[in-house]
Amino acid sequence: WHRENYKREFSITLLNGIGKGGLDLSFNRFSCNCDDALWFYKWMHAHKDKFASLTGIVCHFDKPIQMRTAVLFDLKERELCPINPAVLIAIISSCSVLFGGFMILAVLFKLRWNIRHCLYVITYRKKGYETISNDPDFKYDVFLVYADNDSVFVFDTVVPYLEAKAYSLCVRSRDFEAGKVYCDNIVDNMNLSRRILLVLSNNFAKSKWCEFQLNFAYNRCLDEKLTT
């Protein structure tokens, strides 16, 4: 049996050497301070069989906003070591910034095709359209817009039919400039074509590239009053 009253420091060697139920620390005034009491709090929970009475071991909160006495063993660790308000504010602020950034990125990703389309319309509204209006001799008669999954139909049916009628076609798989940015290829070749032909299908409706070309063609029609 080992009883320590009003003792402020304890040796781990001493504590570990005490047998079952042989330690009585009642009436010791412990501080409910994280730095001072956390190690002992954890040791208590790991060796509770060594104590004669756990309810008699109390600690005192000495902060003005939290002045009270509590049974040390019954406290939750978060009560003994609460998060610093400044740290909590920093964590909440960081999480808010990260969440806000994630939401912005999610919206930008969802609207990426619309944004890309708007940027190209703004870029080429002057650069591309004015060049065409001053030069009636286009390089192509028709610019074909189609989905990849419709390529067989396009090359077996559409292309032979139109070229048999002496139309000059711009077909991306053969006429786009190698190494050039795909969007630039689309816009530049559209601007070099007299008309734009859309091969509409279920595959067309599912293709984001077809949607991009459709939107650009629509804006060109509005600006030049063309009928595609």
Image: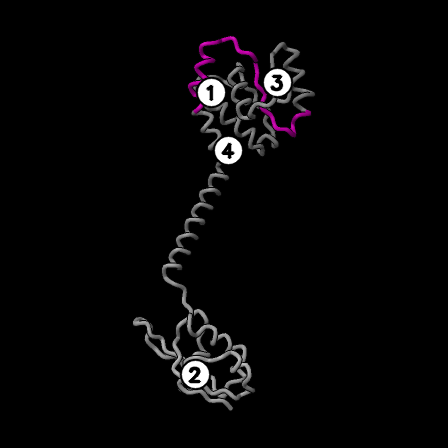
Point out the stretch of residues depicted in magenta.
123-152
Identify the disc placed on residue 113: 4
User: Neighbour class for label 4 at 10 Å: few (<14), some, many (≥20)?
Assistant: some
- Earlier residue among tags 4 and 2: 2
Query: Which of the two labelled residues, at mark 3 and mark 2, occupies the earlier sequence position?
Result: 2
What is the spatial separation of the Cα atoms under label 3 and label 2, in whole angstroms? 86 Å
Give the image location of residue 198, x and y in percent: 57, 23
| SS state under label 3 | helix
Q: Nearer the viewer, residue 176 or 136?
A: 176
Mark whose residue sits in front, 3 or 1: 3
- Give the CA separation, mark 4 to mark 2: 66 Å
Looking at numbered disc 2 in the image, what kind of residue is underneath it? Ile
Mark before the other along the chain sequence, 4 or 3:
4
- Up-down relation of residue 77 to residue 147 (above or below): below
Q: Residue at x 47, y 87 (%)?
A: 24
Alpha carbon distance from label 1 to label 4: 19 Å
